[in-house]
C-alpha cells in the first residue's frame, strides 16, 4: 500500500470508519506525514462516501448551503466537519450530550410550529389565534400577527421563506420573508393578496419587536375552487386537498398548476388485492416533485403528478405490513440523569407471517417522504410506524410485505399523535412517549437477517397529559421542537410506561362484524392548559445549567 498512488490511497481510506480515519496518523511516522499532507482530500472524500455532502460540493465555504450555521460551530476544515457530523449523530443516539431549551416567547398555547434554523427563528400558531415569530437563541419576539387576524388553531406551513396559513373560509394566506421579498416578482403573482392581508401587514409593522429580522410581507391569497382543508407545502409546491379533489399551486407565482379529481375512486389496495377500496376520510397529505401522498382512514394512496393517476394504494387494516416487526420490550424504569438524553430501547425483532383477514380497523394518521424521494414513512393510529425503503418498488409489482418494516412503539392501546422525518431520522410522538428511530438506509432489508435499527426514547418528556396534548413535532438536523408544559421527570409516569409495554391491543365489535381498536383516553381535566415550544438540542455540545435543574415528581 505504501507504493500506491496517493489518489488511490485516498479513495481506499474513504471507506474506513471515520473514527479509524481520524486516528490513522498514529500508526506510523509515514502515515502521520501522509495524513497531514492529504488531510483536506482525505476527509472531503470521506464526507462524500458517508453521505455528509454531495460530490458537487468543492469548497467548504459553501457548506452553509447544506447545513444551518448552528450545525457548523467550530468547523474550519473537512476533518472538523466529519467530526462534527459524527458528534451530532452520536447525540441523536444518546451517545453524546443533548440539552433542552424553552422558547417562552413562542406563546403559552402553542398549536403548530415551523422552524427556520438557518434564519434562527420559530413560527407558532395558537389555540387562541395569532402567529408569532420568535428568536430561537435569544428567546425574544421578532414579529407577530394578531389573534383578530389569524384564526384559532390555524395550521401553518413554511419552507424557503414562504409562510402559509389558513383562514376560516378555507383560503390560504401566503406571506414572504421580508428580507427575501422581491417587489418585481410580487407584481406578477397570479393571486395577489387582498386588502385584509395588506391591513394586517401594516398593523404588524407598527408593532414590530425587532428591525426587519423574522418579518413577513403579504405575497398571495389562494382560493381553492371548493372546500379544502388538508394542505402541505414543500417548496415550490403547495398541495391542498378536499375530500374529493386535490389542488397543486406553484407558490412563487401563485398559480394553480394541477388539479387531481376523484381521489376517492375505488381502487384495489395492495399488490394482490382485488376488492376496490376508497380513500376514506382524509387525515394527512404529503407532496414531492413526482408524487402526492394522501392518508385516508381506509388507505394510503400515492398519485403520480405526471398524469394524476393512482400508482399505489396501501390498506390501513393490515396486521403485519412487513416481514420484520420491531416491538419494544420492558427493561425497567429509566432513571433521569441530566439534560434530555435519548435512551436506547430494548427491542424484540421477529419474523412476521403474511397478514390473514379478518383484520382490526386501524387508520393512517400521517405520512412523510424523504427529501431524496426514495423512502416513505407512515404512522398509524395504533402507534405503529411503517417504514418503506425505496418505496417505488411497490409500483414495479413488489409486494409491500417484502419491503416494509413494521415498528410498534409501545402499547397499541396508546394512540399516536405526530410524525416527523428528516435527514434519515424518524421522530414519532405517541401517548406513551417521544421516540427517535434511526434505520440503516444503506441496507434496510438484508437477505435472511433483520434490518439494523436504533430506537431511542426521551424519558425526560414522559408526562402522559402532555403527551396527550402534544399537537406538533418538528425535526431539523440538530433539533427536535414540540409543544410542552413543563420539564418534569415523573417516576410514576415512567413506571406506567414500562407496564404498558406488556399490554396488547384491545378491540370492540362493530355492527358490520369488524373489530375496531380501543384506545386509552386521558381523564377529563388532566391535560395541561398551557404549552410552549421546547427545543432539544442534538449538537452534542454538552448540557446546560437549565437542564441540570429539572425537577422530578
Image (cartoon, rainbow, N blue to C red):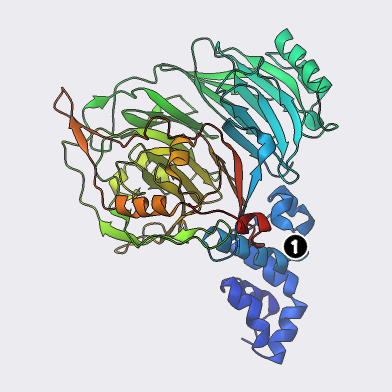
State the residue at coordinates (24%, 47%). Answer: 504
Number of marks present in the image shown: 1
Where disc 1 sits, the SS reads loop
Residue occupying the far left of the picture: 513
Give the residue furthest to the bottom: 29
Nearest the eye: 269 or 527: 527
Depth check: 132 or 310 in front? 132
Q: Which residue is drawn at 69% across and 17% down?
A: 220
Residue 311 percent coordinates (x, y) = 38, 32
Residue 75, given in percent of the width and then of the height, sits at 75, 62
In the orientation shown, which residue stands out farthest toward the front?
A: 553
Q: Is residue 236 visible?
A: no
Left or right of 466 in this view: 331: left
Rendered location of residue 16, percent (x, y): 57, 74
Disc 1 crowd, CA 10 A, few/some/many (<14, 14-19, 20+): some
- Residue 246 appears in the rendering: yes
Q: Which residue is drawn at 59% across and 22% down?
A: 128
Q: In which quarter of the image is the N terminus?
A: bottom right
- x, y percent for residue 97: 60, 63
Residue bearing the label numbered 1:
75
**317 horizontally vs 130: left or right:** left
Image: 82 above or below 356: below
Q: In this view, does 67 lie above or below 288?
A: below
Choose between 467 and 451: the one closer to the eye.
Answer: 467
Q: Nearer the viewer, residue 322 or 407?
A: 407
Amino acid at each position: 500500500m505504501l507504493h500506491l498512488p496517493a489518489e488511490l490511497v485516498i479513495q481506499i481510506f474513504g471507506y474506513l470508519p471515520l473514527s479509524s480515519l481520524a486516528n490513522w496518523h498514529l500508526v506510523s511516522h509515514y502515515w502521520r506525514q501522509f495524513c497531514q499532507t492529504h488531510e483536506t482530500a482525505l476527509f472531503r472524500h470521506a464526507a462524500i462516501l458517508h453521505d455528509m455532502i454531495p460530490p458537487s460540493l468543492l469548497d467548504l465555504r459553501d457548506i452553509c448551503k447544506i447545513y444551518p450555521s448552528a450545525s457548523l460551530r467550530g468547523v474550519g476544515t473537512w476533518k472538523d466537519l466529519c467530526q462534527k457530523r459524527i458528534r451530532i449523530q452520536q447525540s441523536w443516539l444518546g451517545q453524546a450530550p443533548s440539552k433542552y431549551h424553552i422558547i417562552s416567547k413562542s406563546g403559552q398555547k402553542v398549536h403548530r410550529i415551523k422552524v427556520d434554523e438557518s434564519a434562527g427563528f420559530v413560527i407558532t400558531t395558537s389555540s387562541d389565534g395569532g402567529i408569532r415569530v420568535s428568536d430561537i437563541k435569544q428567546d425574544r419576539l421578532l414579529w407577530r400577527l394578531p389573534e383578530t387576524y389569524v384564526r384559532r388553531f390555524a395550521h401553518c406551513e413554511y419552507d424557503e421563506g414562504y409562510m402559509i396559513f389558513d383562514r376560516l373560509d378555507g383560503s390560504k394566506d401566503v406571506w414572504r420573508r421580508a428580507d427575501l421579498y422581491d417587489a418585481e416578482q410580487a407584481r406578477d403573482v397570479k393571486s395577489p393578496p387582498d386588502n385584509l392581508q395588506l391591513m394586517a401587514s401594516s398593523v404588524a409593522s407598527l408593532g414590530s419587536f425587532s428591525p426587519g429580522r423574522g418579518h413577513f410581507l403579504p405575497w398571495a391569497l389562494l382560493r381553492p375552487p371548493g372546500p379544502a382543508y388538508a394542505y402541505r407545502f414543500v417548496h415550490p409546491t403547495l398541495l391542498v386537498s378536499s375530500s374529493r379533489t386535490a389542488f397543486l399551486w406553484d407558490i412563487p407565482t401563485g398559480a394553480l398548476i394541477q388539479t387531481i379529481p376523484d381521489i376517492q375512486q375505488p381502487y384495489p389496495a395492495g399488490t394482490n388485492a382485488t376488492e376496490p377500496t376508497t380513500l376514506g376520510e382524509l387525515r394527512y397529505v404529503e407532496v414531492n416533485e413526482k408524487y402526492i401522498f394522501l392518508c385516508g382512514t381506509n388507505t394510503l394512496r400515492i398519485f403520480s403528478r405526471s398524469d394524476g393517476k393512482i400508482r399505489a394504494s396501501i390498506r390501513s387494516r393490515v396486521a403485519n405490513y412487513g416481514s420484520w416487526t420491531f416491538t419494544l420490550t420492558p427493561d425497567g424504569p429509566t432513571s433521569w440523569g441530566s439534560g434530555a438524553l435519548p435512551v436506547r430501547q430494548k427491542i424484540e425483532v421477529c419474523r412476521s407471517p403474511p397478514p390473514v383477514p379478518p383484520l382490526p380497523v386501524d387508520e393512517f394518521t400521517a405520512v412523510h417522504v424523504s427529501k431524496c424521494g426514495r423512502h416513505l414513512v407512515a404512522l398509524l393510529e395504533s402507534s405503529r410506524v411503517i417504514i418503506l425503503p425505496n418505496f417505488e418498488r411497490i409500483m414495479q409489482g413488489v409486494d409491500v410485505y417484502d419491503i416494509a418494516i413494521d415498528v410498534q412503539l409501545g402499547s397499541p392501546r396508546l394512540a399516536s399523535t405526530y410524525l416527523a422525518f428528516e435527514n434519515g431520522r424518524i421522530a414519532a410522538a405517541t401517548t406513551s412517549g417521544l421516540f427517535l428511530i434511526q434505520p440503516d438506509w444503506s441496507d434496510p432489508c438484508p437477505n435472511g437477517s433483520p434490518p439494523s435499527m436504533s430506537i431511542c426514547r426521551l424519558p425526560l418528556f414522559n408526562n402522559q397529559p402532555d403527551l396527550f396534548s402534544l399537537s406538533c413535532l418538528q425535526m431539523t438536523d440538530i433539533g427536535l421542537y414540540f409543544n410542552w408544559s413543563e420539564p418534569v421527570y415523573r417516576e410514576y409516569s415512567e413506571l406506567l410506561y414500562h407496564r404498558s409495554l406488556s399490554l396488547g391491543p384491545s378491540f370492540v365489535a362493530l355492527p358490520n362484524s369488524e373489530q375496531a381498536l380501543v384506545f386509552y383516553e386521558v381523564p377529563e381535566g388532566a391535560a395541561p392548559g398551557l404549552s410552549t415550544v421546547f427545543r432539544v438540542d442534538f449538537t452534542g455540545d454538552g448540557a446546560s445549567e437549565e437542564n441540570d435543574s429539572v425537577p422530578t415528581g
